[in-house]
Amino acid sequence: MRIRLHGTPTEITATLTALAATLDIRTVSRRYPDRPPSTLERIYLDASPRKDTRP
């Protein structure tokens, strides 16, 4: 699956860490900043459920 994270750099880092606990993250894109004056940015992930967390 492809996931987009959009937020502050701190939020993105924290969310990426949390997602890594339940997803097998295959790729992470570079950070794409929003247009000024926004301080938000986004990254894209390719991920799948981890085998050890499936029911």
Image: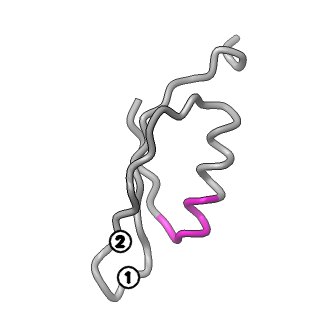
Q: Tell me how many marks there are.
A: 2
Dot 2: element: strand
Query: Callout 1 environment at 10 Å: few (<14), some (14 to 19), or many (20+)?
Result: few
Residue 37 drawn in magenta = no
30 sits to left or right of 49: left
Q: In the picture, which quadrant includes the C terminus?
A: top right
Q: How is the image coloured?
A: one colour
Residue projecting furthest to the bottom: 37
Is 49 displayed left or right of 33 in the figure?
right
Q: What x and y, as percent, mark residue 19? A: 62, 41
What kind of secondary structure does the magenta stretch mostly adopt?
Answer: helix
Which label number is shown at residue 12? Answer: none
Q: Which mark, residue 38? A: 1
Instruction: Please report the bounds of the magenta region as a residue range.
Output: 7-13
Q: Is residue 53 above or below residue 15?
A: above
Pointers 1 and 2 in contact (C-beta within 8 Å):
yes
Q: Residue at x 66, y 31 (%)?
A: 22
Q: Residues within 10 Å of mark 2 (few under 14, many from 20)?
A: some
Left or right: where 44 falls relative to 21: left
Position of the N terminus, as image quadrant, is: top left
Q: Residue at x 71, y 16 (%)?
A: 52
> Residue 43, percent across and down?
41, 55
Name which of mark 1 and mark 2 comes first in the sequence.
2
In the rendering, at what x and y percent does residue 26 appear? 48, 32
